[in-house]
Amino acid sequence: MLYDAVKHLPDQITMPAPTPSALHQQLRLATKEPHHALDHHPLMARLLAPHVSRDDYGDALAAMHGIYANAETALLTYLAHHPDLFDYAPRRKLPALEADLAALGRQPFAATVQLPAIDRAGALFGMLYTLEGATLGGQFIATRLRQQGAGDLPMQFYTVYGEHARSHWLAFLESAEQRCPQTEYPSAVATAVALFEDIRSHLDTCRQP
Ligand code: HEM
């Protein structure tokens, strides 16, 4: 397997760029606009501004907590009954998010939305796609914050896979291609889109005074 050969090497040494699978293409296309809505959402866009305050940074993390807490519980519950589909436990991001919130002295915002149910393989891979892809955006945000002189902010969540973000992403895509049957693709796409939309609606609520 490609991933087995490269997983111990830093990504800048390996950097394979495979042709996107049909599933990946469908997911990427369907979530393009919802992703745009998220990365332009006032709570998130502030992270890319020239001067990011600790409060703004903490707001974005506090808002994400409810999403990750509920999504990871749902993922691990489903995978406990379908352990061959994916090993998510070592990829949990909530501990990193909670460590950052603790370092900032912040409490999480409560969850305000019900996330899509994970009741079949397609839904599983749609939710995994969204959370695993977000680690790429996280890397981008962390790099940007350092460039803007905000490198002292706690960034465990946005750098959760360290230098292995790209290889973890490729390994996820490989698993999805192998283990998500084609008949499940519509469910994967619908779940990913619904999750993006739920996150946006949750961020909208968190933004209210
Ligand atoms: C300010 C907020 C965000 C920014 C600036 C951002 C930025 C990016 C960037 C630059 C990439 C491409 C990375 C690459 O290919 O190397 C990416 C990919 C992705 N992001 Fe975000 N992102 C943000 C928020 C989010 C959030 C909140 C989610 C969902 C929870 C998300 C989900 C994804 C997904 C699924 C991909 C993979 C797209 C693909 O299939 O190639 N992003 N993001």
Image (spheres, grey):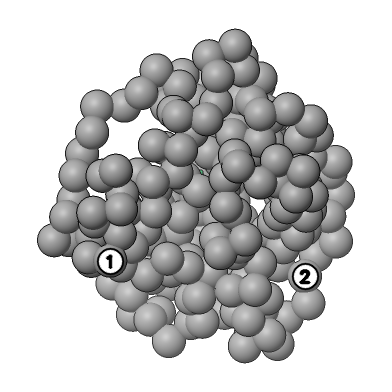
Give me the C-alpha separation between circle 2 and circle 1: 34 Å
Packing grade of label 1 (10 A; few <14, some 14-19, many >=20) is: few
Residue 38 visible in the shown view? no
Q: Mark 1 points at which residue?
A: 8
Q: Residue 158's spot in the image, x, y percent?
A: 48, 66
Marks 2, 1: nearer the viewer = 1
Tag 1's secondary structure?
loop
The amino acid type, in three-letter code, at marker 1 is: His
Q: Determine which of the numbered discs, if any, sits on residue 126 in the image.
A: none
Task: Kindly indicate whether the residue at mark 1 contacts the one at mark 2 (C-beta within 8 angstroms).
Answer: no
Query: Is any atom of residue 169 visible in this view?
Result: yes
Q: Mark 2 points at which residue?
A: 108
Looking at the picture, does residue 45 appear above or below residue 92?
Answer: above
Neighbor class of circle 2 (other Cα within 10 Å; few <14, some 14-19, many 20+) is some
| Quadrant of the rendering where the C terminus is positioned | bottom right
Say left or right for 54 vs 79.
left
Q: Where is residue 184 in the image (x, y as percent from the top left)?
A: 61, 17
Residue 12 is left or right of residue 173, and the answer is left
Tell whether circle 1 marks a residue whose Cβ is less than 8 angstroms from ligand 1.
no
- Give how far across and how far down residue 81 sits, in percent: 77, 43
Mark 2 CB lies closer than 8 A to ligand 1: no
Residue 94 location, x and y as percent?
66, 67
* Mark earlier in primary sequence (2, 1): 1
At mark 2, the secondary structure is loop
Number of numbered callouts drawn: 2
Instruction: State the residue at coordinates (77%, 70%).
Output: 108
